[in-house]
Amino acid sequence: MKFQKKIGVPLYLQIKEHLLAKIDAGTWPDESMIPTEAELCQEYDVSKITIREAIRLLVRDGRVSRTPGKGTFITKKKFEQKLDRFFSFTRWALQNGLEPASRILKVETIPCDLHIARHLDIREGETATRVERLRLGSNEPLMLEVIWVPSSLCPDLHIHDLSNVPLNDILQNNYRLVLVRALESIEPQTADAYISKLLAIEKDVLLLHVEHTAYTSTGKIAYFATSSYRGDRVKFSIELKSS
């Protein structure tokens, strides 16, 4: 796969795309180390600054990861999540051959600020249960999730097993809430210091930030959730059909 410089395109972008093509072609197996900066400088006849910027973009996109003192490695194959039904992390992890686990970071009942109140369609100052949890697959952190549930709809939610039982099951079995639809939005986002530490990624790695609002059969909002998925380990897919 020969590299040819193009006029008018920054060299670091050209090298990034060329390295990406080699990764997609299977030049290096998953989790294997790519050539060192010095070797890439010699191969492409460019400076270390150019190579480092190309590598930085590949790290940001989740295609490679850097280990200080060891080198730069091809990331593992991404897990696919299909956007065609209500999502259960536990079931999804098992379908991908992973051992699901949740680590509860915080559960609290607090008054809602205006932003969250609007998402829950309640008045500012009304209380909601806020659940912050880290979702893991075979001990690998994959997603940070924050959920807000109106206290008026689900009192004493904190007493339930939020680590091991899917939230939708708790709402249906314990609160008789039937979820019939949900709205989701997905945006790219970079990890801040807090999230990057929890997910064991570098701060400039892209996240898949999802906002999810679930509705009951009576039209009430059952919960609002934000989920930050590791962009280097998870990808979304959706099947489209003609009408």
Image: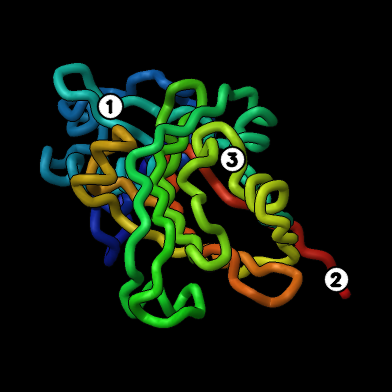
Residue at 61 percent across and 41 percent down: it is 166
Q: Where's residue 61, x and y in %?
A: 37, 47
Judged by depth in the image, the label closer to the viewer, 3 or 2, is 3
Q: Indicate the amino acid at tag 3.
A: Phe
Q: Eyeballing the image, is 167 above or below 179?
A: above
Mark closest to the chain's N terminus, 3 or 2: 3
Q: Nearer the viewer, mark 1 or mark 2?
A: 2
Read off the residue under disc 2.
Answer: 242
Q: How far apart, in angstroms, are the residues tagged by discs 3 and 2?
A: 29 Å
Q: Is residue 234 visible?
A: yes
Q: Left or right of 157: which side holds 46? A: left
Report the residue that reaches farthest toward the right: 243
How many numbered dots are placed on residues in this image? 3
Circle nearer the viewer, 1 or 3: 3
The circle on residue 87 is: none
The foreground one among 97 and 30 is: 97
Q: Residue at x 75, y 70 (%)?
A: 217
Between the residue at mark 1 and the residue at mark 3, the CA separation in whole angstroms equals: 30 Å
Give the numbered dot on residue 89.
3
**Is residue 15 something that shows in the picture?**
no
In the image, 237 versus 87, the foreground residue is: 87
* Element at label 1: strand
Residue nearest the viewer, comparing 41 with 55: 55
**Residue corresponding to mark 1:** 72
Q: Position of residue 185 (x, y in %)?
A: 52, 68
Find out whether the residues at labels 1 and 2 contact each other: C-beta distance under 8 Å.
Answer: no
Who comes first in sequence, dot 1 or dot 2?
1
Amino acid type at image mark 1: Thr
Q: Give the structural element (helix, strand or loop) at label 3.
A: helix
Label 2 sits on what residue type? Ser
